[in-house]
Amino acid sequence: MKTTPIHAMPAAFQRLLILALATLAAPITALPEVPEPEAGGAVILSGGPDGTSLRAIGEFVPGTKIEEALFEIGSLTKVFTGLLLAQSVVDGTVSLQTRISEILPEGFAFADPRIGDISLAALASHTSGLPRLPDNLAASANPANPYAHYDKSLLLDFLRSSRLEGKSTPADRAARYSNLGFGLLGYLLEEAHAQSYETLIRRKILEPLGMENTFLKVPYAAVHRQATPYSGISPVSQWDFKVLAGTGALWSTAPDLARFAECLLYPERFDFSDSVSLLKKPLAAMGGASIGLGLLQENIWQYDRLYHDGGTGGFSSSFVLTPSTGQYFVVLANQSNGFASRVANKLMQASVSAGTSETPSPTEAQPGLKTVNLALYQGKYTMGPNSTFHVQKFDDHLYVRLTGQLALPVRLTETDRFVYSDVEASLEFIRDPSGKIKSLSLHQNGRVIPAPKTGDNPGRPFLLPDGQAEEYAGKYALGPEQIFEVRALNRQLLVQLTGQPALPVLPSGTDRFEYDVVEAFLIFNRDPSGEVSGLVLHQNGLELPAPKQ
């Protein structure tokens, strides 16, 4: 049964990532221990001036050498698409100011002319104003492989009929992560060059860099090297792309991505200097980072880093470069939900600790700070268009929920500073000269990310009364192979549809719960005795029942 996808693909802005294999140097011994995923595994590559280390954890492709294992790299593809745009500017095919309407056929009609005026630079820096996903993707999508059906005709239909939100102009649009935007960019480069995206990537990037194990479509002879994708403990489908290939279609190996890292760090060695310089040039602020042509930049664990992460239904990846030291990390995992990013963060933290003999850690609690009016901190604090902290007081505790995540408790450690109880992170609240709280800063993984206060009302309560969440827990059959698993966690509900990320849902009425990363909600049904007997997914005008198993 095909259903509407519930996903926030990819792990895009949720968090974060030579020498040929024959020249690998002696292993670096400072790599930290990292936990194995619930299922699947990961290949971890750490490189730099002193050598390169390659190792694996868990299981990914039995019988295949770790350097030959192929993984979907998801949104890391965007960096390749950004470099392809930079090369196209350098060779004079397009400019960064080239507009969509200049590439599409003359006379192409836009319902909203502002879409036609979007520049290639705006697409590459996520400042186009386009949504994360096109609104005509979901209706006929297979949630286990949501992009496989989306072709050129559907993309052009979207461009003809859609309108941008609000009255913004390109000059005042904030960066808002858009998979659609990068997929469209890849298609427009195809049209500008009159060559397929696959041909362009291979001819202009992969072949010059000697990346022989990076593919848009894995050839038959290499299929046996593809890792099996997992979400949690469940094997899921790989993802396929048509017209939106530029947003997330590539497969690669760790050594190939190490070679790509060397190109970005030392472009003069590969005759890529002009295009890589353009790729790295910051164009917009994005959360606590800046972004060039798809490549993110920020200070992480005391160093300026270049990075991008990737995530599909059953894979995650992370790619991090430190230009000042020449160090880089590549993590490829056949486990979703940001597993590779968590491993990369441990690698970066260990690299700092090795030089200081100390591991950065949250501030320890200080005595004498128990009589604080926690209600003063309540409100909304916005990091970016899709990322808002909701801070609420419950009983004698402060809870913080970031868009798309469960609410977590924080505890006071010093004046206006709180640490999370469950993750290594802290929040610092900033006051204006009058003493009123005006913003907060998230301190995590070596980053300091500001979030101005945007409202005093923190929204609906996001914790349920004690014992109520457990009433909804269970499995609900949307179709023969599509199961909603509903879990009760700390007075909240976490819902996962087969092959998709687990997402929290927020109470919004009697037996009604809303998603906050997609426009959808769930209504739970009860039998005559009052027991929960099923749920109904409401999305895109559809009502899809799922009886409780």
Image (spheres, helix red, strand yellow):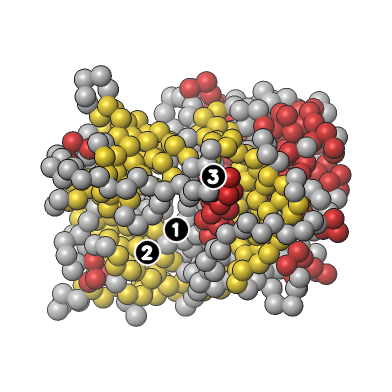
Q: Residues within 10 Å of mark 3 (few under 14, many from 20)?
A: few
- Identified by mark 2, the residue type is Val
Position of residue 74 measured from the top left corner of the image (x, y, whole percent): 62, 53
Which residue was labeled with disc 2? Answer: 495
Question: Mark 1, mark 3: which one is toward the viewer?
Answer: 3
Per the rendering, the mark at residue 356 is 3
- Identified by mark 1, the residue type is Ile
Which residue is found at the position 85% from the left and 55% from the top? 23
Per the rendering, the mark at residue 6 is 1
Position of residue 131 measured from the top left corner of the image (x, y, whole percent): 50, 40
Mark closer to the chain start, 1 or 2? 1
Is there CB contact under 8 Å for labels 1 and 2? yes
- Identified by mark 3, the residue type is Thr
Residue 30 seen in this snapshot:
yes
Q: Nearer the viewer, residue 313 or 240?
A: 313
Which residue is found at the position 55% from the left and 28% from the top? 284
